[in-house]
Amino acid sequence: MLVLWTVGGALGGLASGVALRGLVGRFTSTGVALPLVSAAVLAVLALKFAGSVEVLAFACLGAVGVALSFIDTAVHRLPDVLTLPAYPLVLVLLTVAALTGGTFGALGRAVLGGLVLAFVYRVLEFLNPAGMGYGDVKLSGVIGMALAWLGWPVLLFGAALSFVLSAVVSLVLLLLRKVTLKSALPFGPFMLLGAFLAVLAH
């Protein structure tokens, strides 16, 4: 049964990657990389949430997250055309999960977690606009919803891990002289990777 879930996730990821390739292609070329990475990410998420309705919400965020990571890495942008629709999609799918599983406490926590993380990112963006973009702020809310659904510790771990990953990669690139202290790295991919790893560790 787990094999079926994994294969189903991979096929869903492949399909979503192909479907989003045209939109992502407006910002950067991905070739076959986008569908393949999407297939891998959704296969892992399907295996993680096998047999649960919440898998749909996390698969949705995973598909959008892969596309956003490609774009942000290439052009340092997190376009609204991908970020904003993720909110109602993830919220509706989590609501369906709550209705079928009776986890209304988790749903309320998810909404609150999204608001809290978005507020924290908005404060950080206000204090240091050079280091935090408004696109990151908008992405943080939907990430916060997904992580808080799993629990407050998962939200805290995922949020903290994003900054740790960013710091480590920045330090390595500095040591390798690939960037300078004035270089700006896109933060969106670290937010999404931190969230992904926190979900897997849950």
Image (spheres, rainbow, N blue to C red):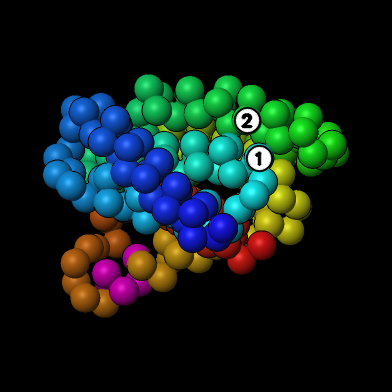
Q: Which residues are magenta?
A: 170-174
Residue position for label 2: 93
> 128 or 70: nearer the eye?
70
> 27 or 52: nearer the eye?
52
Callouts 2 and 1 close, C-beta under 8 Å = yes
**Relative to 200, is 108 above or below?**
above
Q: Residue at x 37, y 22 (%)?
A: 81
Disc 2 secondary structure class: helix
| Whether residue 165 can be seen here | yes
Q: Is 97 situated left or right of 188 in this image?
A: right
Q: Residue at x 29, y 30 (%)?
A: 19
**Amino acid type of the residue tagged 2 in the rendering:** Leu
The spot of residue 156 in percent (x, y) is: 68, 56
Quarter holding residue 199: bottom right
Neighbour class for label 2 at 10 Å: few (<14), some, many (≥20)?
some
Q: Is 38 situated left or right of 165 in this image?
A: left
